Amino acid sequence: MKRVSAIILAAGLGKRMKSAMPKVAHTVLGNPMVWHVARAAREAGISEIVFVLGHGRESVMGTVERFGGKVAVQERQLGTGDAARSGLSAVSPRAREVVVLCGDAPLIRPRTLRSLVAARRKKKAAASVLTGILPDPAGYGRVLRNPDGNVARIVEERDGDATVRRIREVNSGTYVFDRAFLARNLPRLTDVNAQRELYLTDLVVQALEEGKVVVPVVAGDPDEVRGINSRRELAEATALLLRAKIGALLDSGVTIVDPGRTYVETEVSVGADSIIEPGVALLGSTRIGRGARIQAGCVVENSRVEDGVRLQPYSVLSGARVRKGAIVGPFARLRPEADIGEGAHIGNFVEVKKSRLGKGSKANHLAYIGDSLVGRKANIGAGTITCNYDGIAKHRTIIGDGVFVGSDTQFVAPVTIGKGAIIGAGATITQDVPPYALALSRVEQKVLANWVIRKKPELLAKAGLKIPKLPKGEAK
């Protein structure tokens, strides 16, 4: 939308949240609630966004930066009118309309904002206001209409009488203003009310005094006007957004076996024909490809899982990439910068961190692979560890194509294993191994016949075994 700017009011303390963190920084489906408001504004076509911040504003700066927003500071919380005045000072002179949004209303939708702008323009009104018809309007300001259907007054609940409180149409706190009207009338607001605050709603009276109208636009979904003031309301809003997210995935061709036991955050994407089993959590910016299967209990955060991948039960991924057709788990852990190659296998109780496994490589049991580069079709035996940390710095292990690593091997990095080499079980590798070589480090095995009979016969007695006689000529 051309020449439209948004002001997001996000300076409130949110005392009912009972938190040291500002209300708008609390997360709803993986992002701060103010992030959802800013995203709605951006997707509605509004390029300039001004965030009015106050207490704890450093916790909101990540959202401001993500949207390239501007910051206006409201040092003292003197009401919505004062907050809008602070925000307007940062709005570009080119803007001719200003959308004012509440930072604690994360259910607002882009199409609703576009409708609100269109309604104001159609009637050339001073403002348009988003309203909602609620079965229980307690706590919200009420909208009083003129006979022509336009807004006559908006009365805060604590300032209204019994008749006003019976009205079910409520003010959402979301407006679109003519810029000139807003700039002209914000300085005229007074604090003659129960809260001794500057109410943005008083601009309705000023519009009528100028012979202008304020257009009400009823939200198609009453949930859009929900403001978050408590942890309970935060949970309710999260549940609503989650239900919508799950519904969108189902509609796009994803199978979700048990929607009531699946958690998927806002920015996650999942390709068609993928299957999500119960107890799965998909978090952050995770991308799941087509035809993948995410089995029970998996947690995937900020990771990329490509087509046809199978994540077996209770695997945990964070900042990882799993390439086409690979299998991970069960009970595997992929830490940041783990990169599992096409068709590779990462098995039970294997941990991978900051390492790349090549196409078709396998580490199927009880291994730690850290700060490593593993080539194609290598086999990492059970109990293998890359000893990547010397107490001061991390070091790299390089394992070439086709290397076979026997069980219970330790690679003391930095070390390079050439392609096609074999590492014998139980080895501790401290030096480079050339291609096609066999590397062993264990001591030659010794067998002392009848040693237990001669030295520890009590162990046999304890086990209920008869202590045999030593062969003739064998000394005790």
Image (cartoon, helix red, strand yellow):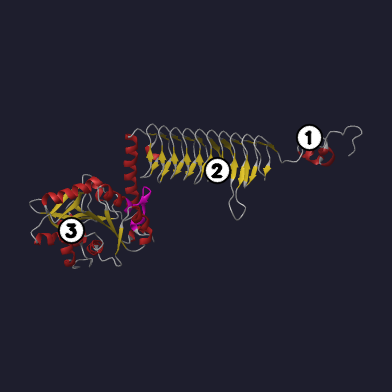
Residue at 42% from the left image edge and 42% from the top image edge = 281
Q: Secondary structure at mark 3?
A: helix
444 horizontally vs 288: left or right: right
Viewer-proximal residue among 257 and 389: 389
Label 2 vs label 3, nearer the camera: 3
Spatial CA span between label 2 and label 3: 57 Å
Instruction: Check the image and report above or below for 291 versus 428.
Output: above
The earlier-in-sequence mark between 2 and 1 is 2
Label 2 or label 3, whichever comes before in sequence order: 3
Q: CA distance from mark 3 to mark 1?
A: 97 Å
Which of the 4 image quadrants contains residue 288?
A: top left
Q: Inspect the magenta stretch and tell me whether residue 80 lies in it.
A: no
Residue indicated by mark 3: 179
Q: Which residue is mark 2?
A: 351
Q: Residue 65 at x, y = what percent?
A: 35, 55
- Magenta span of residues: 23-35
Question: What residue is disc 1 on?
Answer: 465
Is the residue 259 above or below the residue 80 in the image? above
